[in-house]
Amino acid sequence: MLRFIIIIFYVVTFLIIFIPILLVEWIIGLINKDAKGRLSLFLVRNGFRLCLWTAGAKVIVVGEANVPKDRSVVYIANHRSYFDILLTYVRVPGPTGYIAKKEMLKWLLLRRWMANMHCLFLDRENVKEGIKTILTAIDKAKRGISIFIFPEGTRNKVNDTFLPFHDGSFKIAEKSGAPVIPVTIVNSAALFEDHLPKVRPATVILDYGEPIYLKDLDKETKKNIGAYFQNLISERYFALKEDFAAKLAPKK
């Protein structure tokens, strides 16, 4: 329970103490938007690293060399834990925006930081607004900003299962031409969700697949694109669980 309290205290303190930094970033953004993005990336990434260290997260990274460093990509990942964003964001090589639920907008300071980090807020109940969000994400991808999506649409609450991947999540890659990087996250719920409200040390696997260009897929695969990537990540998930079973076992 102590780890949970420390992390919450740190996050709240970060959001309050760094209010002046938001003003500094706004001024920097008027002069150089890229510099503003790099500053946000640096501050938040290091803040997330501290949270993960406090939580006792040991991360085994596989296939990170598959991520291109010279262009934007669209990351697609399974989603089981609140820690998934922290685990993945600390490893992105450049500016990367996450697609978040519109409910995040009610947290004023948090949404300001997220906006500085190129995050977008998706309203799945409003088709018109949803399309606008996707178009904005496509534009960002074309300008060299990577996009990270959890195509299940919400955090899955059952271990070793996958919610259907929404086909619409892949429009950004299709229209921008950015390659898709399948990201498989294994055991992240062992940090928190498996024993709420306690945060406990755990080993997490973060696996990056090879880039996939949607234009290279056959017509039938494109027609069922969500199911294709769900199967891809699901198969990889269980293979990783087997390969790293000894390291994933909880400490006694």
Image: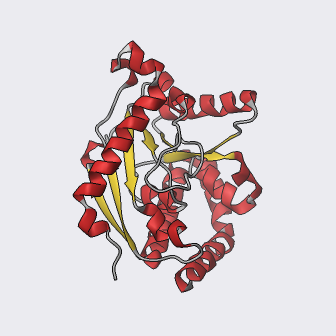
Rendered-image quadrant of the N terminus: bottom right
Residue 40: x percent and y percent?
54, 58
- Say above or below: 134 vs 29: above
- From the viewer's side, name the closer residue of 55 and 146: 55
Residue 208 makes an appearance in the image = no
Tell how many labels. 0
Nearer to me, 136 or 84: 84
Residue 73's x, y, as percent? 41, 37
In the image, farthest residue toward the top:
219
Instruction: Give the residue displayed 62% in from the left and 54% down from the top.
Output: 114
- The x, y position of residue 163, in whole percent, is 53, 43
Is 167 situated left or right of 62 in this image?
right
Q: Quadrant of residue 113?
A: bottom right
Residue 236 seen in this snapshot: yes
Q: Is residue 27 left or right of residue 32?
A: right
Assign the C terminus to one quadrant of the image.
Answer: bottom left
Relative to 236, residue 89 above or below? below
Seen at 40% across and 61% down, the residue is 187
Residue 152 occupies which quadrant of the picture? top right
- Colouring style: secondary structure
Q: Residue at x 45, y 26 (%)?
A: 225
Q: Is residue 59 left or right of residue 135?
A: left
Q: Going 45% across and 68% down the picture, which residue do you hit?
A: 190
Q: Position of residue 127 (x, y in %)?
A: 72, 28
- 136 up-or-down from 155: above or below: above
